[in-house]
């Protein structure tokens, strides 16, 4: 039997394809309407990952690329749950993150920002959620960085987050921002999101209860994926 | 609070940005960090069916290749089953999922896999063999979903319930790859146009 369909994606909370204030979107945005597709088995299934795919150290960005010592920067824990729209935890799903170092520089051959590379910081991590949908990363807080859009745009401190969920229809890439950052309302990429509450949902909250005293400060960030219909009423047993 | 709906709302998408490789394909960003990167081997050594190569390029509205794009592919095996607990069994090592990056200079990408079989559709229909693709890049605010169909499956394509949702013949054609042969290997070329003449069909799944 095919797994149940997902709730329709609410396209009014997501950024549209064309957002002229984020200039790169202009030439990279489809102009025709998308074709709406009722879920088939191709959309309601998706890849699964296990502990053989990754290593325990992969979620510790403070140590996973350390060569001569710890990376420079404010030590933080980012933790939270992956949930669906029914508020059910999504266990065993792969969460991948990437970020700039504390100075706002990425370890990428295409990043030429003048802030230095940190020899002890790679800037990526990955983990599987546990049975309760919980995940955690240890890292350093990324710095703000300038980018070419208008002449003077600065990205707020952010961590890029990729999540699989249980099906290809739930695949999501988003960004985590930090509570209190004055650059958030000024960022054209953040502002591609038309719904203020949807922006608020991407801002991680300072979570003093989850800190490690005298070691690392913590932020909580829950990620919500599309919810799935219940199959209580199977009124079309052939198919669906 | 009775009569209050307690649904959560999906987290909003944000662009993967120009440095997506750091997170999803660090080797391409220029460094080695993980024991293994994921998504390089789609079909595995035991997969039945025809070994094929798929290649292509993503083209922007100016007609230029998108050199920093990242694609993910999700496909069934030759029997039409996905590597998913609820879709039947597949060969050991068949993952059906791959992560594809481009050559940074040309924007060209390619991957090796097996040709998928026909897949069950809704309400007893049959879907023609296809690859499900998801495309992210700088400037793409939310991942784009499309499908690649096979030119040597004209009959199955003609009955495919998803292709038949597209009322325009010329737009339907944007989802069908071109076939050529490279030695023994069939090579399917799939050019994805984000915008402008020949804009590829994208799906709201
Ligand atoms: Fe970034």
Image: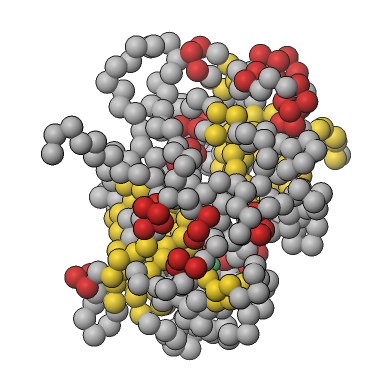
Q: Can residue A116 be seen by looking at this rendering? A: yes
Q: Is residue A221 left or right of residue B196?
A: left
Q: Is residue A109 above or below residue B104?
A: below
Q: Percent position (x, y) of residue A84?
A: 33, 43
Give the quadrant of residue A230.
top left
Give the image quarter of residue A126.
Answer: bottom left
Circle count: 0
Residue A167, horizontal then vertical, whole percent: 45, 38
> Which residue in the rendered view is the most extreme toward the left?
B1
Q: Is residue A134 left or right of residue B102?
A: left
Work out which quarter of the rendered image holds the C terminus of chain A and state it: top left
Q: Quadrant of the N terminus of chain A?
A: top left
- Quadrant of picture, ligand 1: bottom right
Say whether residue A82 is left or right of residue B176. Answer: left
Q: Residue A224, how many percent across, how many down?
A: 36, 48
Q: Residue at the location (71% across, 15% down)?
A: B158
Relative to A22, B111 lies left or right = right
Res A94 seen here: no
**What colour scheme does the image use?**
secondary structure
Tell me which corner region of the image, top left, top right, bottom left or bottom right, holds residue A32: top right
Q: Residue at x 63, y 80 (%)?
A: A113
- Residue situated furthest bottom in the rendering: A68
- Tell me residue B130's x, y (percent): 64, 29
Q: Is residue B174 above or below residue B37?
A: above
Q: Is residue B148 above or below residue B71?
A: above
Residue B114 vs residue B92, the one in the foreground: B114
The residue that appears at 58% across and 16% down in the rendered structure is: B126
């Amino acid at each position: 039997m095919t797994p149940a369909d997902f709730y329709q994606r609410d396209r009014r909370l997501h950024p549209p394809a064309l957002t002229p204030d984020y200039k790169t979107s202009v030439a990279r945005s489809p102009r025709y309407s998308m074709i709406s597709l009722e879920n088939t088995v191709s959309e309601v299934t998706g890849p699964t990952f296990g502990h053989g795919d990754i290593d325990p150290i992969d979620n510790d960005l403070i140590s996973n690329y350390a060569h001569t010592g710890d990376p420079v920067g404010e030590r933080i824990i980012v933790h939270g749950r992956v949930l669906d729209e029914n508020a059910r935890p999504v266990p065993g799903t792969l969460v991948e993150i990437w970020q700039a170092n504390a100075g706002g520089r990425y370890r990428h051959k295409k990043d030429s920002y003048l802030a230095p590379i940190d020899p002890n910081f790679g800037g990526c991590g990955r983990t599987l959620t546990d049975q309760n949908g919980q995940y955690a990363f240890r890292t350093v807080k990324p710095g703000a960085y300038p980018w070419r859009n208008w002449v003077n745009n600065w990205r707020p401190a952010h961590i890029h987050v990729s999540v699989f969920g249980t099906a290809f229809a739930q695949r999501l890439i988003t960004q985590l921002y930090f509570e209190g950052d004055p650059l958030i309302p000024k960022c054209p990429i953040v502002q591609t999101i038309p719904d203020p509450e949807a922006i608020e949902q991407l801002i991680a909250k300072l979570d003093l209860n989850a800190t490690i005293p005298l070691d690392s400060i913590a932020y909580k960030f829950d990620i919500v994926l599309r919810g799935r219909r219940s199959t209580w009423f199977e009124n079309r047993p052939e198919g669906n | 609070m009775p009569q209050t709906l307690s649904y959560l709302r999906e987290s909003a998408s944000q662009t993967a940005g120009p440095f997506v490789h750091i997170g999803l394909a660090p080797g391409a960003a220029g460094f080695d960090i993980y024991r293994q990167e994921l998504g390089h081997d789609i079909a595995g050594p035991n997969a039945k069916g025809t070994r094929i190569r798929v290649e292509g390029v993503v083209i922007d509205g100016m007609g230029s290749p998108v050199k920093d794009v990242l694609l993910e592919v999700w496909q069934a095996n030759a029997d039409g089953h996905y590597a998913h607990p609820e879709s039947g069994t597949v060969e050991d090592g068949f993952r059906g999922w791959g992560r594809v990056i481009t050559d940074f200079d040309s924007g060209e990408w390619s991957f090796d896999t097996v040709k998928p079989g026909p897949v069950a559709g809704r309400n007893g229909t049959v879907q023609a063999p296809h690859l499900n693709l998801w495309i992210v890049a700088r400037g793409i605010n939310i991942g784009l979903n499309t499908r690649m169909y096979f030119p040597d499956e004209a009959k199955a394509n003609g009955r495919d319930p998803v292709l038949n949702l597209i009322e325009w013949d010329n737009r339907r054609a944007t989802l069908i790859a071109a076939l050529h042969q490279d030695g023994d290997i069939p090579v399917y070329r799939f050019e994805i146009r984000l915008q402008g003449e020949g804009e590829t069909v994208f799906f709201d799944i």
